[in-house]
Amino acid sequence: MSTNLKNPPHCPNCGKLMPAGPLAGFCPACLLAQGADRASGDGSDSGRFDPPSVEELAGLFPQFEILGLIGAGGMGAVYKARQPALDRLVALKVLPAISPRGANFEERFNREARALARLHHPNIVAVHEFGRAGALHYFVMEFVDGTNLRSLEQAGRLSPRESLQIIPQICDALQYAHDEGVVHRDIKPENVLVDRKGRVKIADFGLAKILGAEPEAARLTAEGQVMGTPHYMAPEQVERPLTVDHRADIYALGVVLYEMLTGDLPLGKFAPPSRKVQVDVRLDDVVLRALENDPARRYQKASEVKTQVEHIASTPDTGGSSTPPSILDGTLLRWAGFPLVTLRDGKRRVNRKEAFKMFVIFFGLLTLAFGLVSLVHGENLFGWLGIAGKASL
């Protein structure tokens, strides 16, 4: 691929100007982040966690009825289980006691688990219990009967209106966590759960940073490592990981909102949402401010994002929404000028009113045509048609 000197290449992840001959199309900082992600076990098979079978878990956790595996990754696995003593469903998350995250993993696990167990909020997955069983660390958590945001996006089941109902709930969860001194550091669609009633739950605080921790505790948690998921990490998570604060979560929230609205990640010199899809143009300002590279220029609180989004959702767009060239007034099918099938809130709808109008007009035109032919032939058209029919026999 040739390089245009007038338009020097930018990193598709963070948008920064790339040096000559970038490796794999990313700047060195983002490559470092991806390397850290692979080293943690998410990008390669070496050191990857092999989830135990249901039978193996049943022996370690006799107090639970293990119902099945929900999902597994490089660092752990989550199972659906039933707790007969309390007659409730729970999610059992297990992690290896010996982790590639470092020799101090057990200390960090215990300290962070205690901190996260303090978080009691309707939009955060509750932690009921944690500890160690055999060679596994474990969390017993609230079971969310639903799916994650990534699955909803891939299924194409999110309209802009539904997206604006989800974002305020994420903001509530983040604001509460931030007020409690906890930074999530890994907000992404996979970690946003939505139950069958549309209620949002933030999950997986495994990379969380506890603000205001003692120096030794901070060393155990961060150790200067890059923590997060590429494309969702704020620039400071890569460049200055020890200085990361709650505003990194606001950046990730901006990425999630952009992706929910457009279906794409905001990579490189990206277009505002309203230039890609038919959404309220006022959302452009919300997204762009949340995605500022400088933390000082972003929203300073998640509650500020919620206020803006709720205001936009509840008031009409007097300036008019921007419409991309691929969509004409939300119409998917026109026939003879009538919009028979339209796209509204991401759903196809048959416009019955327009179809009825078309039928009435065409029926009227047909009647008029028969009348004109009658006048031309000087007799009742239907009588003429009857004679013509007999003559043809």
Image (cartoon, grey):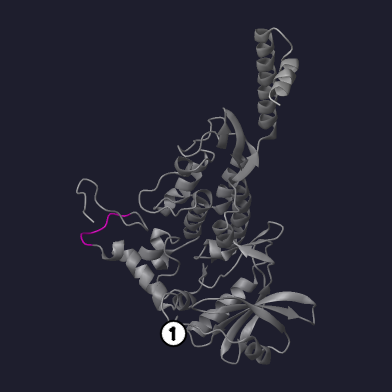
The reply to whether the magenta stretch includes residue 138 is no
Q: Position of residue 324 (x, y in %)?
A: 47, 38
Q: Give me the residue at 39% from left, 61% from top.
A: 236
For label 1, count other residues whose C-alpha is less than 10 Å away and answer few (under 14), some (14-19) or many (20+): some
Q: Secondary structure at mark 1?
A: loop
The residue singled out by tag 1 in the image is 47
Q: Is residue 192 visible to us here?
A: yes
Q: Position of residue 57 (x, y in %)?
A: 64, 88
Q: Quadrant of the N terminus?
A: bottom left
Q: Quadrant of residue 361?
A: top right
Instruction: Give the residue displayed 66% in from the left and 13% down from the top.
Output: 373
Q: With 310 as the anchor, is 82 left or right in this view? A: right
Q: Which residues are magenta?
A: 16-21
x and y percent of residue 200 in the render? 65, 59
Relative to 113, is 303 above or below?
above
Question: What is the magenta segment's predominant secondary structure?
Answer: loop
The quadrant in which the C terminus is found is top right
| Count of numbered circles in the view | 1
Tell me the quarter of the picture where residue 370 sits: top right
Disc 1 marks a residue whose amino acid type is Gly
Q: Position of residue 87 (x, y in %)?
A: 80, 77
169 relative to 239, above or below: above
In-front residue for pair 196/60: 196
Q: Residue at x 21, y 54 (%)?
A: 2
Where 259 sits versus 186, above or below?
above
The question of residue 18 being in magenta is answered with yes
